[in-house]
């Protein structure tokens, strides 16, 4: 028997659909089980998907994002026709383990599906290492590291490149880097191969410097903090298409004004 759990955002559209979808699954012999589920359905857009990954147990689960929101890059299911959705679930052969960031900081390990942000309201200085080779002494207000799926989120808003789904890479962006006669940064966004490791150390700041993962404040860093980041496979699978034509269509629908 397939056991499932539904996580939803709080919009009326999602709540109404959730009720109908639950009834449909139960009639098909599926069982709702909040503790021992093997299938997790997330209703909403990308924001709901990211938030619920933080909230629910995802280890060894199959995850489906059904787009009842506005932005749906994580969704491979955009139809709200329940019969169509169920056929897609049953027939889905393209389960992937998405790439996530493994972030180690001061003895703790965290995971990010979208992005990791090291940020201050004032200028910070830190050393950046790529595969243990010193890259630069950065000075500015923050560093943003994004996965390929996170490249269309905050990274894009900060001028980062979009990484297509079939590319095994992630990116690092310098936010408001300092460039004057006394100190200059490389400044350009960097695309890193999937097996590259990043590390940050020797922090200098006046007030505070925060570690933020997928929009959630994790902790304030100290001048002795060390942050290391790897690009790894997630411990869950989700039904996702890497079809380039579909991906470009989503980019166009999300970012291009159709009236232009």
Image: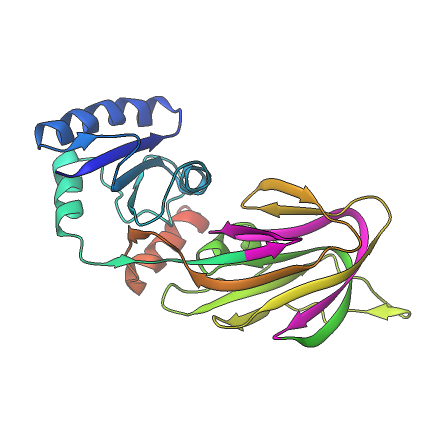
In the rendering, at what x and y percent does residue 49 appear?
Answer: 40, 41
Report the predominant secondary structure element of the magenta stretch. strand
Q: Does 17 sit left or right of 26 as displayed?
A: right
Can you say whether 28 is above or below 227 in the image? above
Q: For the N terminus, give its image quadrant.
A: top left
Residue 82 lies in the magenta-colored region: no
In the rendering, at what x and y percent does residue 166 appear?
Answer: 36, 68
Question: For this rendering, which residue is in front, 160 or 60?
Answer: 60
* Residue projecting furthest to the front: 107
Q: Residue at x 49, y 64 (%)?
A: 231
Residue 118 lies in the magenta-colored region: yes
Q: Residue at x 53, y 64 (%)?
A: 230
Quarter assignment of residue 11: top left
Question: For this rendering, which residue is in front, 64 or 255?
Answer: 64
Can you say whether 17 is above or below 51 in the image? above
Can you say whether 66 is above or below 141 in the image? above
In the rendering, at what x and y percent does residue 48 appear?
Answer: 42, 37
Instruction: Tell me which colouring the rendered structure shows.
Output: rainbow
Quarter assignment of residue 202: bottom right
In the rendering, at what x and y percent does residue 186 appear?
Answer: 72, 72
Q: Does 217 sit left or right of 209 as displayed?
A: left
Answer whether residue 197 is visible to the viewer in this image.
yes
Answer whether residue 260 is visible to the viewer in this image.
no
Q: Does 98 sit left or right of 36 as displayed?
A: right
* Residue projecting furthest to the left: 28
Q: Residue at x 25, y 45 (%)?
A: 77
Q: Does 72 sit left or right of 127 as displayed?
A: left
Quarter assignment of residue 130: bottom right
Magenta residue span: 103-131
């Amino acid at each position: 028997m397939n056991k499932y759990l539904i996580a939803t955002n709080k919009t009326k559209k999602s709540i109404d659909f959730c009720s109908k979808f639950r009834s449909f699954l139960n009639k098909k012999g599926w069982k709702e089980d909040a503790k021992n589920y093997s299938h997790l359905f997330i209703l909403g857009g990308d924001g709901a998907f990211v938030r619920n990954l933080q909230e629910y147990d995802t280890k060894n689960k199959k995850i489906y994002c059904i787009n009842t929101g506005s932005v749906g890059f994580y969704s491979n299911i955009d139809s709200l026709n329940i019969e169509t959705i169920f056929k897609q679930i049953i027939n889905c052969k393209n389960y992937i383990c998405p790439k996530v960031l493994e972030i180690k900081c001061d003895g703790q390990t965290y995971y990010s599906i979208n992005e990791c942000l090291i940020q201050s309201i004032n200028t910070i200085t830190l050393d950046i290492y790529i595969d243990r080779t010193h890259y630069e002494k950065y000075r500015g207000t923050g560093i943003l590291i994004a996965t390929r799926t996170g490249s269309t989120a905050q990274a894009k808003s900060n001028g980062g490149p979009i990484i297509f789904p079939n590319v095994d890479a992630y990116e690092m962006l310098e936010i408001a880097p300092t460039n004057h006669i006394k100190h200059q940064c490389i400044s350009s966004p960097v695309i890193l191969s999937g097996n590259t490791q990043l590390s940050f150390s020797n922090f200098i700041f006046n007030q505070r410097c925060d570690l933020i993962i997928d929009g959630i404040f994790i902790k304030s860093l100290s001048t002795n903090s060390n942050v290391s980041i790897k690009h790894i496979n997630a411990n869950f699978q989700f039904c996702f298409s890497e079809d380039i034509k579909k991906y470009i269509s989503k980019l166009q629908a999300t970012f291009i004004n159709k009236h232009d």
